[in-house]
Amino acid sequence: MQTIVKMFNTDKWVLPYLRRYKKLLALVIFLGFMTVFCGTALMFISGYLISRSAQHPSNILLVYVPIVLTRAFGIGRPVFRYAERLTSHNWVLRLVSDLRKKLYLKVEQRATTIRQEKQTGDVLALLADDIQHIENLYLTTIFPVVIGWLLYVVFAAFVGYFNWAFGLLMLLLFGVITIILPLASVALNGARSFKNRQLQHEVYVSLTDGVLGLTDWVIAGRQAEFVEKQTALMNQQVKIQRQNMQFTWWRDFVINLIVAGITFVMLYFGKVQFGNSFLDVNYIAAFTLAIFPMVDAFQGISAGLTDIPTHQSSLERMNDYDELTVTAPAAPTITRQAALAFKQISFNDVTFKYTNQQRNVLNGLNMTIERNQTYALLGPSGAGKSTMLQLILGDLQPTSGQINLDGADLSTLQEYRHDLFGVLDQQPYLFNTSIMNNVRLGNLQATDDEVKAAIAAVGLQDLVEKLPDGYATVMTEGGQRFSGGERQRFALARILLQDAPIIILDEPTVSLDPITENEVLTMIFSLLADKTIIWVTHHLTGINFANQVYFLDDGQFTMSGTPQALYAENAHFKQLLDLDTGVNNYQ
Amino acid sequence: MIDRRLFTMPGIRKTLGMLAVLITLQAFSVLFQGKYLSTSIVTLWQQKPFVAVLQAFAFFLVAFVCRHLLTVLKNYVVGHWVEKTIVKLRRDVLKKVGALGPKIIQEKGTGNTVTLALEGIDKTQTYLMLVLIKMFDLMIIPWILLAYLFTVSWQEATFMLAIYPVVILFMVILGYAAQAKADKEYANFIRLSNHFVDALRGLPTLKQLGLSRKYANNIHRVSEDYRVSVLSTLKIAILSTFTLDFFTTLSIAIVAVFLGFSLIDGTKALLPALTMLVLAPEYFLPLRNFANDYHDTLDGKNALGDVLDLLSRPTLADDKTLQLEQWQADTQLTLDNVKVAYADSHDAALTIEHLALQGYQKVGIIGRSGSGKSTLLNLLGGFLAPDSNSAQQITLAGQAVDHLQLQAWQKQFQYIPQTPYIFHATLAENVAFYAPEASEAAIIKALAAAGLTEFWQQLPAGLATLIGEGGQAVSGGQAQRIALARAFLTPERRVLLFDEPTAHLDIETEMNIKQAIVPLFANHLVLFATHRLHWVNQMDYVLVVEDGKIVEQGTPSELAQQNGAFVQLVADVNQLGGVK
């Protein structure tokens, strides 16, 4: 219970938006209220109508108003309901647009240019799901609860208008249904829901683990064990779900017992208030019959509130994305032209350490990057290669030491960053839009002809023009219809259009087979011959393209030099290169 | 609405029988509830003292409580059956996944398989809970009420009977119209709703291009387009609910007005009229309940369909009679005229005219990506079944078999893929996965052989340290060494299948790991698929695969002399090799 209150208190994703679209929200609530109101009023008026008719009024005009109202409410209910559903969806979807933009900007702040975790994509898809959850939070929880409570207050006030004592009694009895029982069920069921969610997560993790390792289970001949292991957890969950459901069934039963009580009180109220006057007795049926459609609307309150715990984790996850302050970079000390015409970039005693870690990722690195030279950077995973790239790009700042571009601190040049650097990584992303648009992302000002020229330069002209839709072909699912080598070439075309003087290559060929790798590397280095290139690679294919080779291990350079010199003088390098080329003793 | 296969599930008939009895009882409770509520109201209307109401109200109370008690009972009866069914379905799905093996994962993807086993079954559960009760309610309650209403006043009852098919007809017509419209817009929906995920996944790329901030407005715009598109579909889609609502509430209104007129005429008394009015909403209630959850149930029906489809997939029969001795220096596996072709998969098709493997051969399998190397390994590992053809002959240790998905065969080998899977478990459990009974000393020895002594000794809890997803991080090289330790721990598995084990490793890690792998080759039949040609130095036989065929096979030196596919491949791969 407290966690839910806390969740709403710290929330920055739901409440602010209630204010933003106030008018539309008021309309949704109004329409929702009118829907239930019409339903209730229909039974109320009908009850009155036939009671009054049974008194054989001398003139049909005496029941004319109830007749008209009966029809009006009969038509009003579905019409209001229809309008309410459209308006509420409209409101929620409008909100979703805002939420998406907001979430995107939050994630954008944190995203770094160099991909680090493989699973980022899944985490992000999860976030997209969370927005869906918030959508449901409104549609199934907030709206029905607010509308239900509004109706509850209005009805109690209506009864109170005739007799304040009964009004108070109604406030109390309906309060049990609309407030006490729903809140009690959240409190009572909260622990179980929490446990259920936990188990659900465990089941999910455990099954994913099992399925990912399925080959091993099968080869080890342990399939039966695999099934046992998974079902044991799942059966625990089944038990909790059973308790959950039984709780709901009995809760609804108790609600209905209270409804029976209310019916009794209402009959008594009818007798006391209206029972002794010929004309007033007709209201007895009216009031009594109105109870049932109203109780129907109150069912949504319990269901809605009980759903809160399921939305809770989504909301928590989204709110976790909220505490990041970014300091604006210092103003550049050199002009854009001067920066683009740089002569060298130098690392001076650069050390880097993440604030939450003990170990230095980079340890006093010195390195000079000359214009128009190619630098190959090798090392085992975790050696600090990605960190070096992030430092160069300005996504990270050195803990000590400087990285200078012609004497200017590189971190002050963030404004020019996209003019200075082009990046080609392992999995350049191809967006779900046309080939033309995808390549044009390199330079939004490029004309169609320039885009086509870039595509021709990477040798994809024939391939693209043979497609039924040509340049308008949509890249679905991250460009899955193209091979890995083709995808890299599209990304390369993008880089060509971007035309930055420094190109960062982050293992661009790691997932390609060696022959495709050769083709792609040859193309990259011939098209980018006039650029300064920093190339992270995991093996030595194409090492001839590099002017300098640096081996990084544990945050320090262990070997460096031209490939030729290293091959001649360094036994370890020679051994590696021989291994890489598969020097053949079988010939 | 209903999957027919539902009625073949065990226990369903008994459950439905009980359900029908309970619902019939409930229909009568509803009936008496309405009747006695009306009686109570009429009594008061006649200005009798309140005590006069008590008897009728007591009857109402009994009927009302019975009705809701029966609802709980219905839920218990169905809930019990659903739970049993779900537990069984889940177990069956897991068994099936285990029996189908890695093939199903390759085909459906890990995510989809997990989703099917978890969410799919959850949805099925909701579906079964909803559909049985609501369907039976609809089949029983309205008709009992209607029969009674005919005895009360046949005119209004006739009207209510007549309106029923009209409502359903309109719902069906509008439902179809909405479906057509939704289908038309569906592609658009998917594209727009995926747009956001697309942007998030592509964020690093957008950031690299300096477009990530600008793109935020694009997200908003596309999302707004999506809203407009959804609303236009929704306008029609919820029309069917509107119709239902419209006809049912209007019917109640019309019945009320009719009754009013006949009361004024004096042709009817208040009690029957009021009873009619009270029971009219109850008459429509089952239909409304059924329609409200229509979309949920449709979802659940599809989920159930998926689950049942998976369960009805054929599995290859394991030949339990097959007796296999441990692989020896003279054991043979021969394949003749074996074909694998599959319609909807990325893997290449494969045809093997003749392949003979014997004893402790070290066989390298080389070829370009997509040539069929992985298919060959999958076939040999029994993860894939060959297409049946009469000319096919597979002989394993002198016995003819139809395929290699055989427990007895799979117990003979170890499979080491490009990225071995590390379970979320302790290091010891991971290493001893293939030999759960292994002693700690044996595990330590295997770890030493794989070059992991230093690694495990540095772990916070040593062998008992949790590794894998969410535990201590393990690098690609270390994962590969853990897989090697598994192989060192099970020397009785004398066949080793390697699928590109070093492709993703950096060159120094690769060199170090090679030193741990090579000693493992002794006394093993080795099948080693790779792009990295230096491994050929450790092989004594090479298969060159091209376009789904073994185009060359022989010892490395034989092939080097042939100046054929092998020589060409070596030249292609090494184009950029060396230092000039």
Image (tube, coloured by chain):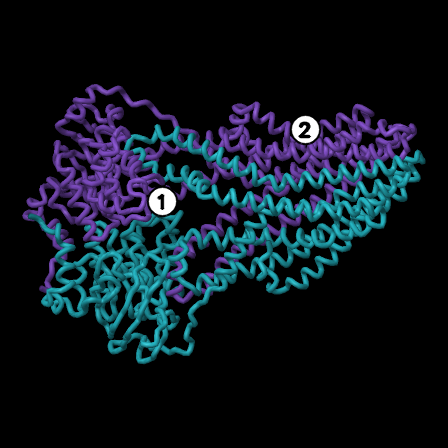
| Chain of the residue where label 1 is placed in the rendered structure | A
Chain depicted in purple: A
Residue A587's spot in the image, x, y percent? 9, 64
Please give the residue where the numbered disc 1 appears in the rendered image: A476
| Chain of the residue where label 2 is placed in the rendered structure | A
Residue B492's spot in the image, x, y percent? 32, 71
Q: Is residue B61 left or right of residue A176?
A: right
Q: Quadrant of residue B446?
A: bottom left
Which of the two discs, 1 and 2, sits closer to the camera?
1
- Amino acid type shown at disc 1: Thr
Residue plotted at (52% across, 53% down): B303
Please give the residue where the numbered disc 2 appears in the rendered image: A150
Mark 1 touching mark 2, by CB under 8 A? no
Q: Is residue A266 visible?
A: no
- Disc 1/disc 2 C-alpha distance (Å): 47 Å
Q: Nearer the viewer, residue A358 or A24?
A: A24
